[in-house]
Amino acid sequence: MARHSYFCPIRWSDMDVYGIVNNVSFLRYLEEARVDFIFRMAPTEGDAFFRDGSVVVEHRIRYRRQLVHRHEPVEIEMWVSDLQSATVAIDYAVKDGDTVYATASTTMAPFDYTAGRPRRLTDEETRFFEKYLDGTLAVG
């Protein structure tokens, strides 16, 4: 089972009035990490999953520690916790070594924007996600 890590910069504008990274910024971090991860599917042609269309079905985040602005990026480790014929759940740990700031999960579905309806994962998409399939839930 493989995992993918993305090192996300923390921007000054990500902080809220209390001096901690705002909860909405965490969603942006997850999006950046997810795009970086999925781009690995077809790096020479752009991302196949997004090119053919996909939608976010659900986000779940559990905040564990406050994250503050600093110059070093934060690691976002990702894996696939569930893979069905028409959905994929990508789980995350936002962390520094053993210090975990948040755990999260995003369920995505492939979507045919021309037809205006969900579609099934292609064989290529399924093969890609299977390499990262772990089954461990980040948010229980």
Image: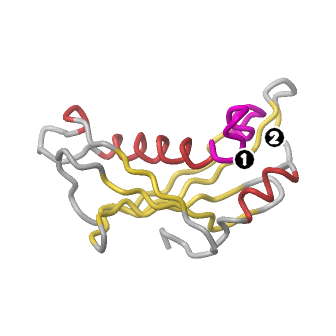
In the image: residue 4, left or right of residue 26: right
Q: Residue at x 63, y 64 (%)?
A: 80
Q: Quadrant of residue 61?
A: bottom left
Residue position for label 2: 118
Secondary structure found at label 1: strand
* Quadrant in which the N terminus appears: bottom right
Query: In the displayed structure, would residue 70 be above or below residue 128?
Result: above
In the image: residue 118, left or right of residue 75: right
Q: Amino acid at mark 1?
A: Ala
Question: Dot 2, how many residues are within 10 Å of its Cα: few (below 14), some (14-19), or many (20+)?
Answer: some
| Magenta-drawn stretch contains 1 | no
Q: Which residues are magenta?
A: 39-54
Work out how far the residue at label 2 is from the one at label 1, CA to CA, in angstroms.
7 Å
Q: Report how many numbered discs are placed on residues in the image.
A: 2
Q: Residue at x 23, y 49 (%)?
A: 72
Q: Which mark is residue 60?
A: none
Q: In front: 30, or 127?
A: 127
Residue position for label 1: 109
Q: Are marks 2 and 1 in contact (CB under 8 Å)?
A: yes
| Magenta-drawn stretch contains 51 | yes
In the image: residue 51, left or right of residue 27: right
Q: Amino acid at mark 2?
A: Pro
Q: Residue at x 80, y 53 (%)?
A: 86
Q: Quadrant of residue 111?
A: top right
Horizontal and vertical percent position of residue 14: 25, 37
Mark closer to the chain start, 2 or 1: 1
Q: In front: 68, or 118?
A: 68
Horizontal and vertical percent position of residue 82: 68, 66
Q: Residue at x 59, y 58 (%)?
A: 90
